[in-house]
């Protein structure tokens, strides 16, 4: 999918990029290559392909879901500068 220099400049403006005028031809070629690759990928028939979470069959070892630490909330709230109803109070930073 060939792009002209005006399209490259518009894309750069939308992305808030400053382009060197001498390199616009390089950007045309490289961005055209990327768009051609996307076109090729879109043409692949994936109707009978199941989506994968990852391409390899790797199974994560799972640990038991159990509490391993004591609840120390009261201990930490005693040393906090300000606490109210179990919540830490902090200075207001947004008006």
Image: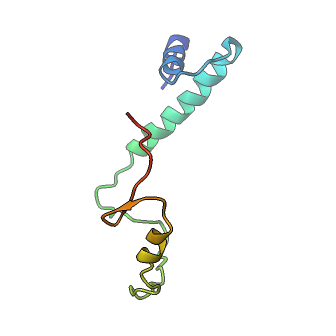
Q: Where is residue 76 in the image (x, y as percent from the top left)?
A: 48, 72
On screen, residue 39 versus residue 19, left or right, reads left
Q: Where is residue 91 in the image (x, y as percent from the top left)?
A: 44, 46
On screen, residue 26 versus residue 13, left or right, reads right
Position of 67 relative to 12 (above/below)? below
In front here: 88 or 5?
88
The answer to which quarter of the image holds residue 21 is top right
The answer to which quarter of the image holds residue 77 is bottom left
Way the structure is coloured: rainbow
Furthest residue in direction right, as rendered: 22
> Which residue does the image show at 40% across and 37% down from the upper left?
94
On screen, residue 52 versus residue 33, left or right, reads left
In front here: 72 or 49?
72
On screen, residue 30 versus residue 80, left or right, reads right
Indicate the quadrant containing the C terminus: top left, top right, bottom left or bottom right: top left
> Which residue does the image show at 47% across and 84% down from the upper left?
69
> Which residue does the image show at 71% across and 13% down from the upper left?
22
Q: How many marks?
A: 0
In front here: 33 or 66?
66
In front here: 43 or 82?
82
Q: Where is residue 29 in the image (x, y as percent from the top left)?
A: 60, 25
Q: Position of residue 27 (x, y in %)?
A: 61, 24
Position of 59 relative to 41 (above/below)? below
């Amino acid at each position: 999918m060939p792009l002209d220099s005006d399209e490259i400049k518009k894309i750069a403006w939308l992305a808030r990029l400053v382009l060197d005028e001498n390199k616009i031809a390089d950007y045309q070629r490289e961005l055209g290559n990327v768009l051609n690759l996307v076109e090729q990928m879109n043409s692949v028939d994936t109707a009978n392909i199941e989506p994968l979470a990852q391409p390899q069959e790797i199974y994560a070892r799972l640990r038991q879901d159990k509490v391993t630490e004591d609840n120390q909330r009261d201990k930490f709230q005693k040393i906090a500068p300000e606490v109210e109803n179990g919540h830490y109070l902090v200075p207001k930073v947004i008006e």
